[in-house]
Amino acid sequence: MNALFSLAGIPQRIDLIKTVSCGNDFLQLDLESLSEKRRSRLGQFAHAICDRHNGMGADGLVARCSISSGTFGFQVFNRDGREAELSGNGMAGCAAVVFALEPGLNSITLQTAVGPRRIACKQRRFPRVDMSVEIGPADFANYRQFPFLDKRAGGYASDGIDFFPVSVGNPHAVCLVPSGISEKEMVELGQHLQSSTRFPEGINVEVVRPGNTPGHWHARFIERGVGITQSSSTGCAAIFAVLHKQRLAAQKTVIFSAGASGIHVGGNLDGITVENTTQIVYKGEYAPLSQEN
């Protein structure tokens, strides 16, 4: 019998919702809907389902679980199956789903691997939701994520590429480049830096050049465990932190990327927020024909 005609015999089907935030797409699932076996293999499951050819395709997988009213557990896995500390767009997608399912809620708290983060709903215009997403503080002295840090160093370089290491919960290397550099050169520079032996555990890279308007910047993102992405909210927060530290940030900094007409970032080094619009793209059912998935 053709496998397509045996779907009814699959023991477990998984409900998933796809969200897109500024071009960054995530598959969202309720952890309570998974079997114990799949819960214990979430990374492997994420790797399979996020595959662009053999799965449903996404930059990452988000698993949530309800803790109490308005508070949810949050886990995020990159496309390669490795769990990440944080994802701004992953959190936004998770919140958009919750705001759609629970219209009485206007703010929620997500318990992430690096602490609680608050997301406030600004406007529901389904299938889109406008939100303010708390990314958290910037840390330029995270020796666990950046063991090469030296208090005496004024800056850092790898293979001649200058960068600023900063953690906003997850690790980033931000490169500030001149306005004349091309998109292609920005991506190539970022990919080269990401492959540096300075980052054995991987790194999120942002390459940033000035825009045509004061306070506006143009960025390309190369994310750990994913590769080139159209946007990154934690990446935007990392850029804002570096600009702030270098006294280049406006009160409201706007970052343009391949997937967004302008991402507004604000706050200070003690707390950075990103204005986010997320679209709920579809709700689907994943019924893997292979027991390995």
Image (tube, rainbow, N blue to C red):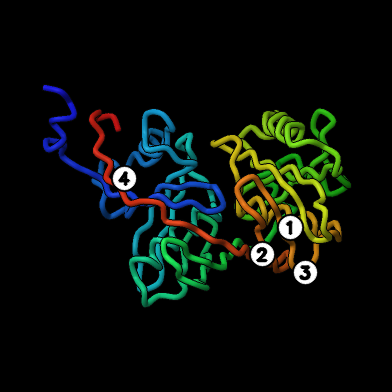
Of the two numbered discs 2 and 4 in the rendering, the one whose residue sits closer to the viewer: 2
Task: Report the front residue among 109 and 248.
Answer: 248
**Residue at disc 2, secondary structure:** strand
Q: Quadrant of the N terminus?
A: top left
Q: Which mark is residue 39?
A: 4
Q: Residue at x 45, y 75 (%)?
A: 106
Q: Residue at x 19, y 42 (%)?
A: 12
Q: CA distance from mark 3 to mark 1?
A: 10 Å
Residue 260 percent across, percent down from the top left: 62, 52
Q: CA distance from mark 1 to mark 4?
A: 35 Å
**Residue at disc 1, secondary structure:** helix
**Residue at disc 3, secondary structure:** loop
* 10 Å crowding of disc 1: few (<14), some (14-19), many (20+): many
Mark with earlier residue (1, 4): 4
Residue 188 percent across, percent down from the top left: 72, 30
Q: Which residue is mark 2?
A: 272
Left or right of 39? Residue 153 is right
Mark with earlier residue (2, 3): 3
Q: Which residue is mark 1?
A: 240
Q: CA distance from mark 2 to mark 3?
A: 12 Å
Asked if 94 appears above or below 104 in the picture, the reply is: above
Of the two numbered discs 3 and 4 in the rendering, the one whose residue sits closer to the viewer: 3
In contact (CB < 8 Å): disc 2 and disc 1: yes
Q: Quadrant of the C terminus?
A: top left
Task: Report the front residue among 60 and 127.
Answer: 127
* 10 Å crowding of disc 4: few (<14), some (14-19), many (20+): some
Of the two numbered discs 2 and 3 in the rendering, the one whose residue sits closer to the viewer: 3
Q: Which residue is mark 3?
A: 251
Mark with earlier residue (2, 1): 1
In contact (CB < 8 Å): disc 3 and disc 1: no
**Residue at disc 4, secondary structure:** helix
Query: Which amino acid does the dot numbered 1 rest on?
Result: Phe
